[in-house]
Image: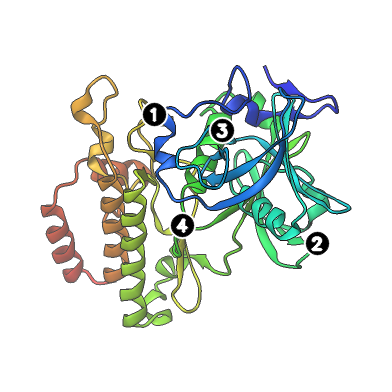
Amino acid sequence: MDKSSPDGNIFFFEEANPTTSFEFITPTTKHQKDLNTPPILTSSFLCKSPTSDKPIQGMYALSNKLIVFYVDEFSIAPESVLEIDYTRLVPVSQDNIHGFTITKHNLTFEFTTPNKQIADNWVNALRNVCVLSGFHDEYKAIKMIGKGSFAKVYLVESRSTNKQYAVKAFAKEAVIQTSKNNPKATMFNEIDIMRALDHDNIIKLYEVHESERSIYLIMELIQGKPLQEPLTKLTFKRDYSQGQIIEMIRSILDALAYMASKGIMHRDLKPDNILVDRTGKLKIVDFGLATYIDVPEYIFKKCGTPGYIAPEVFRYDHKNANTNYNDRCDVFSAGCILFYMLYSYPLFDGHGASEILRQNREFTEFEIIYTIKKRKKQPR
C-alpha cells in the first residue's frame, strides 16, 4: 500500500526500496562496492538524527548511494553509513546555516554547515541520488513533445537558469490502475538504469521529482530527430558524410561497450531509439526495456522490436539457465542498424510484422550474404 505524508503526498519511492528503519548503520559487505569507490564529496557537517537528542559533528562523505560517517577527518575506516537511495531531499538555507534534509519513512536527518558553497555542492550531487519535490516551483512547462502508454514528455524550462530540459511525466493514478506490463516496476527500473549511466552518447537523467499526483524525470533535451527518419526517407547518405557515418557507428559501439561495463543491456536498440542531430552526434534513448544482466529475473523476459531482436532472446526460457542471454543481444541489434545505415534497407524486410518477426527469429549469419546479393540484383 502506498505511504502518505501528513500533507497527503503518496511516496512511491519509499516502496521501491523498503526498510524497517532509516538510520546510520554499521557498514556490511553489501556496502563495500560503494565504499571502494572514491567519494564524490567529503565535508564536515553537524547532523541532527531522529534517534539522537544531540547533533553529531563529524566528517561525512558521499559515496554513490551512501552518506558515510567518519568520527573525524583522520579516520581510515567509516563509523557508519546511511543508505540514501530513493530518499527525499530538501535544501536548507536560513541566516548563516546551510545544508539539506534527507527523509524516508517520516524520519529526517538534517545536515548543516555555515559554508554555503559546501552545502550547495552537496545538494547538487544529491540531486542525482535522491528524490526532490517542488517540480512546479523549479520548472515551467512550455509544450508537450511526446506521448507514450504511461507517460507524457514535455519541454520545460528552469525558472532559475532558463535552461531547457525534456521531462518524462508519469501520472501515478494511471501507473497504479494499469496492471499490464507492470508499469510501476518498469518506471523504477528505468530510473535505476538511467541513474547508473553517464556517457556522451546516452541520454542523461538529471533529477527525479515526486509530487502528490506525478513522477517527473528531468532529462537532457536533445535537439535531433530519430535515426529512423532519414533511413526511411532514403536521405541518410545524402544528409550525412561518410566520415559522419563512421563516427556514428563508433559512437554506438562505444556506448554499448560502456553499458556492458556497467552490466546493463538496452534490449530495444533500434533507429527510433537513437536521436541524431545535423552534425551526426547521436544519443541512445528510451531505457524502458533495459535491465541489469545479473538480476534474478527480468521484468520482461522476451522483448524488443521485430527486425532488431537477437535470436537468443527468442530462445530464452526462464526455467532453463542455459538460455540466459547478455549484452551481446545489443550488439546484434547494433549490427542490424549498421546494416540499414550502410545498405539503405533493413536486414529483415518482410511484408508485415509477422513475416519480419519470423525472419528475425530464424536468422543465421549466412542470411546476411544472401540478403546483400539479392538486393544487389534488385536495387531500390
Q: Which mark is residue 29?
A: 1
Give the side of residue 136 with respect to residue 373, left or right: right
Contact (Cβ within 8 Å) of mark 3 with mark 2: no
Q: Position of residue 350 (x, y in %)?
A: 30, 51
Say which label, 1 or 2, has the lower sequence index: 1
The residue at 49%/55% (across/down) is 285
Left or right? Give the position of 153 relative to 205.
Answer: right
Query: Which element type, helix, strand or loop, lies under badge 1?
Result: helix
Q: Which residue is mark 4?
A: 272
On the image, numbered disc 2 is attached to which residue?
159
Q: Secondary structure at mark 3?
A: strand
Q: Residues within 10 Å of mark 2 (few under 14, many from 20)?
A: few
* Labelled pair 1, 2 in contact (Cβ < 8 Å): no
Res 83 label: 3
| Cα gap from disc 3 to disc 2, whole angstroms | 31 Å
The quadrant of the picture occupied by the C terminus is: bottom left
Please tell me whether mark 2 sits on a helix, a strand or a loop. loop
In front here: 8 or 152? 8
Mark 3 or 4, nearer chain start? 3
Q: Are marks 3 and 4 in contact (CB under 8 Å)?
A: no
